[in-house]
Image (cartoon, rainbow, N blue to C red):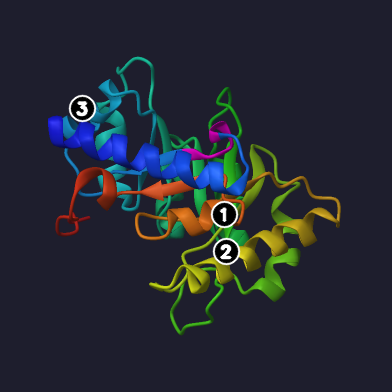
Amino acid sequence: MMQLEDDQARVEERIATACRQAGRAREEVRLLAVSKTRSDAEIQALHRLGQRLFGENYVQEFIAKHDALTGLEPPLEWHFIGALQTNKTRAVAERAAWVHGIDRLKIAERLSRQRPAGMAPLQVCLQIDLSGEPGKAGVPPREAGGLAAAVAPLPNLVLRGLMAIPAPAEDPTAQRRPFARLRELRDALNTRGLELDTLSMGMSDDLEAAILEGSTLVRVGTALFGPRRPKARQ
């Protein structure tokens, strides 16, 4: 518990420092705790320290954690941030508050159709492939406009912004380049009549660079919880 508290304080200070350097208010950047492979007890401990946003990558693990921790107060805000297969959209549509990895219209259509009546609209981000690496998840930047235009009108969804996972880089200047491209893409889409307010970018090793380029949500796992454990089995 003490280690977790210390790690959380360090992450919060890193975010606050980057916000000051960028001339931004700390409240402009939300911290999403990436809790994949972490136990319910660890999530509860971080919740007691005031953390509310948690992100999961694997559907079965997400279902188990969501259902086990539903009674926590204040409630957790669950974000699904992994690749999503069509046969697993219903479980996410019924539980998540946000989905960050939309890169196909079919996934968005299924989430919209399967969102239960009475639930708030599902907040979604398009995942952008900034590197063009083979097998990399995400839609190419040149196709983002078409996908955004198709997703935005869907009922039961609210298109909030863009998400990306750039290739790792150690140099801060190199880290900032892809984040700047994502921000510029968001701004370009907004000139077409969209109202995107979210940039989901930045992780444990590059959150400062992301904040300097306009990130509104950083996804942090290792810096909060320590080294990642092996992937949970689906």
- Secondary structure beneath disc 2? helix
Are discs 1 and 2 less than 8 Å apart at CB?
Answer: yes
Q: Is residue 201 above or below residue 26?
A: below
Q: Amino acid at mark 3?
A: Ala
Magenta stretch: dominant SS? helix
Residue that badge 3 annotates: 45
Residue 22 at x, y percent in the picture: 60, 48
Q: Quadrant of the N terminus?
A: top left
In this view, the residue in front, 214 or 36, is: 214
Q: Residue furthest right?
A: 192
Residue that badge 2 annotates: 179
Which mark is first along the chain, 3 or 2?
3
In the image, is residue 27 part of the stretch drawn in magenta?
Answer: yes
Q: Amino acid at mark 1?
A: Leu
Number of callouts: 3
Q: Choose mark 2 or mark 3, whichever is in front.
A: 2
Which residue occupies 75% across, 66% down? 146
> Is residue 97 left or right of 159 when viewed as pictured?
left
Which residue occupies 19% across, 35% down? 4
Q: Is residue 171 above or below residue 67?
A: below
Which mark is first along the chain, 2 or 1?
2
Residue 183 at x, y percent in the picture: 66, 59
In the image, is residue 76 part of the stretch drawn in magenta?
Answer: no
Q: What's the CA distance linking mark 3 and mark 1?
A: 30 Å
Q: Residue furthest front?
A: 21
Q: Is residue 227 above or below residue 68?
A: below
Q: Is residue 40 above or below residue 184?
A: above
- Neighbourhood count class around disc 2 (C-alpha, 10 Å): few under 14, some 14–19, many 20 upward: many
